[in-house]
Amino acid sequence: MPKEYAIIDLFAGPGGLGEGFSRAGRADDARMKIHLSVEMDDHAVQTLRLRAFLRSFDTFPQEYYNALNGRADFPDWANLYPANWAHAEQEVRQRVLGGAGVFEELAAELDQAREVHAGNTILIGGPPCQAYSLAGRSRNKGKADYVLEKDDRHYLYREYVRILDRLNPAAFVMENVKGMLSSRVDGGGIFSRVLDDLEAAGDGYRLFPLAQPIPADGNRADARDFLIRAEDHGVPQARHRVIILGIRSDIAEGVAPDGPILGNKQPPVSVDEAIAGMWQLRSGLSRKDTTDDWKQAVRLQAAAIAEADAVDENVRAIARLIAAANDLPHLRTSAWKGDISSMSGHLQEWFSDTRLRVTLQHETRGHIPDDLGRYMFSAAFARCFGRAPKLMEFPEILQPAHKNRDSGDFADRFRTQVAKRPSTTVTSHISKDGHYFIHPDPKQCRSLTVREAARLQTFPDNYWFCGPRTKQYHQVGNAVPPYLAYQIANAVRQLLP
């Protein structure tokens, strides 16, 4: 009988890592279950708690599908299934890691998990990345009173290490942004300190890269070897993240994989394939949002692009077709379930749920008419040239009236996700506006919906994100792709006894 491992998920977000590990843990030869998830955000906690409740059943309860398929509110789960809901509330804790008294509160829980499972635990999670990300560092430079060394977010990884030290799990997986590799504090690189602290925690850990061969000399891998390109592992997104696998020293002595732990690269998955079967939708209008008004605005923008100076003739041709089209999209939201048979088999299996008869959270934003033209031009340009245009390549009629538009800081301001390639990195910025996440179809003139973004992040189609739409986007952008987490979980479990 294989050992069962308890998973502790820190800084859990909406549960991307946890979903992958949970799904891998349902296999007879894997046996891993989430014991505790810790997250601070209200809406992410609601999402986590709902998912924990659903996973407490062998199969999701029919009432869940009744609500989704009937577009109705969820029932009172605590009243309907009190024991299962109590389990979910116990599993998911809303806490601010690093806050006063939080570690002391969780310590007893960590001790119990370690003792009950005889040390067979796995710690996963990613400390918040704003202080390490390139975008975050750029924003911080613009703050007059910003002092790098006083930004506590640089040191939140230490809370992860502190819990690692207390739990002393068989293995851990820590995820963070690529910018951690180059981030510097107090005159030194932060990443080497992170690795040193992780190695020294508990009874000591050996650190392994997942996507590169392990050094034959037994030395620690180079820093950049810990970088994983999600698009190399079946994720339809160019998401490059630092992911560190640590295995406790007493177990690591027998770990000698032949080649990269995650195995060989997989063929890239395109945006088109990832959002296959999603119904065409029109965007909204910020004002006077009717279908006729939207179509009129689209035709006017298309006609202007077709007549504009310095526009490629191929782009003009697309604009002329849109200006004359009778089949412009008319829906802003679609619950109809689409056909995903064109997807690769592994993605079909991953996304599909035969009990789900609708597409969840597939509703568009509203945009101003000028942005409809910008989105249309960007998508038409990307269709013709296989890349999104830079801002300087937009015709003058579509240039935004920003004082700093010529600074170069906003060159990628209106970025289409190219249909035949993996998307760019889905980030939490998608919650602010859709300018960097434009749909590849020029006729739809819109940004991606929550569900389309969730597909690029590889959340299963039955995954429900709680909260208003802005918060749903934020959760999706902050997550680890569950399909990547699933592969990591399978690989980690095979290395453990």
Image (spheres, helix red, strand yellow):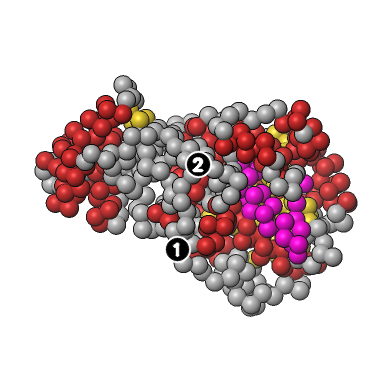
Q: Which residue is mark 1?
A: 268
Could one spot residue 384 in this view of the protein? Answer: yes
Q: Is residue 4 left or right of residue 398?
A: right
**Range shown magenta:** 11-36
The amino acid at mark 2 is: Thr
Q: Residue at x 24, y 44 (%)?
A: 377
Q: How many marks?
A: 2
Q: Is residue 76 above or below residue 356?
A: above
Which comes sooner in the sequence, label 2 or label 1? 1
User: What is the CA distance from the residue labelled 2 to the residue labelled 1?
Assistant: 24 Å
**What is the crowding at mark 2: few (fewer than 14 residues within 10 Å), some, or many (at least 20)?**
many
Q: Which mark is residue 359?
A: 2
Q: Position of residue 136 (x, y in %)?
A: 48, 42
Q: Nearer the viewer, mark 2 or mark 1?
A: 2
The amino acid at mark 1 is: Pro
Q: Residue at x 52, y 41 (%)?
A: 358
Q: Which mark is residue 358?
A: none
Where disc 2 sits, the SS reads loop
Q: Residue at x 74, y 49 (%)?
A: 58
Q: Is residue 242 left or right of residue 274?
A: right
Q: Position of residue 111 (x, y in %)?
A: 85, 47
